Image (cartoon, grey):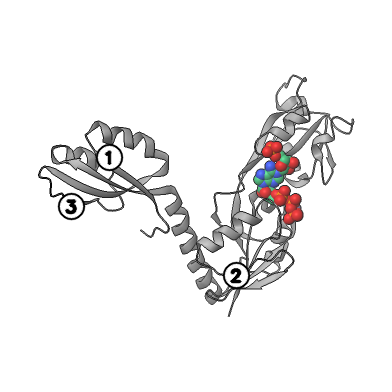
Amino acid sequence: MKLKIAIQKSGRLNEDSVKLLKECGIDFSNSLNKLKTDVTNFPLEILFLRDDDIPQYVADKVADIGIVGENVVAEKQKEVKTLEHLGFGKCRLSIAIPKDKRYGGLKSLNGTRIATSYTNILAAFLKRNKIKAEIHEISGSVEIAPGIGLAEAICDLVSSGSTLFTNGLKEAETIMKSEAVLIANPKLNKQELAIVNKLIFRIQAARKAKKNKYILLNAPNKNLDKIISLIPGMKSPTILPLADKGWSSIHSVVLEDEFWEVIEKLKAYGAQGILVIPIEKMVI
Ligand code: PRT
Ligand code: ZN
């Protein structure tokens, strides 16, 4: 049996979704005009769909699992389970107003018209905050609404902020943060869940590998303890004596985020010949 996964056919999440599956060792051809494709080395079939349709298809079990933005999951309100955050497609859903208007807090949105394609999320946000505003549903180019007199504010996705900027708008409130997630039909059977878990295991290994680097260095034995405490690695670092007495070679793993800070301290403790190497997969 095969599990069906829905990913975006084209658009902002397509490339990273394909990349993630390939990093999980899943082999397939992704020609642009295909609706679906078979995987030969993993029990998976890939469906290429519009992102807006993915929650519905997963809820209806046309696909068993899917990769889609949290924003779409929240907006569509379908019966799906979020299994895993995937770390790409990061953005936020924000309310924006004209740059030259002073923002007087949430209350100042009372009585305004807000243009959006995220009507459900926005309605829930306004209700939660007891704001009475009119929601104008538009499906594309939301950012032009204030300029053409359709609304006083908009609610749309923002990543770099340049779209808002070029349209004379500024962010006033962030309603939600979003990234791509793996969603699943809530009623998968045992066999299907076993395949999902296998996939999640691979996703986690690939993501962990990206967050870490393999590090090799030569350290003076007198500072070995201090150096080891800086790079404790997965269990503990590997230490090998060098032919040069008084020196050891240390192999370990460091977090990408802490990398530069750690390197500086290692150098201060006399570490030399520091090599840092990307890790392909990481299983702890
Ligand atoms: O054809 P299909 O329906 O599948 O695609 P789509 O056009 O509806 O979606 P697409 O490909 O634009 O976005 C897919 C998903 O990417 C979204 O649902 C989000 O989860 C995620 N994502 C991440 C974004 C952005 N960043 C983003 N910046 N989706 C849209 N945008 C748009 C935003 O709407 C605005 O128009 O980019 C503009 C703002 O970007 P900045 O960088 O100028 O702030
Ligand atoms: Zn879409």
Q: Amino acid at mark 2?
A: Phe
Q: Earlier in the sequence, mark 3 or mark 2?
A: 2
Taking 250 as reference, is 159 above or below it?
above
- Asked whether the residues under the numbered discs 1 and 3 touch, taking CB atoms below 8 Å apart as contact, a structural biologist would say no
Identify the amino acid type marked 1. Answer: Leu
Whole-angstrom CA distance, mark 1 to mark 2, is 41 Å
Residue type highlighted by circle 3: Leu
Secondary structure under tag 1 reads helix
Nearest to viewer (mark 1 / mark 3):
3
- Residue plotted at (17% across, 46% down): 248
- The residue that mark 2 highlights is 28
Residue located at (45% from left, 51% from top): 210
Q: Give the Cα separation between the discs numbered 3 and 2.
A: 42 Å
**Mark 1 and mark 2 residues within 8 Å of each other at the beta carbon:** no
Q: Residue at x 29, y 42 (%)?
A: 274
Please count the marks in the image: 3
Q: Which residue is mark 1?
A: 230
| Residue hosting label 3 | 240
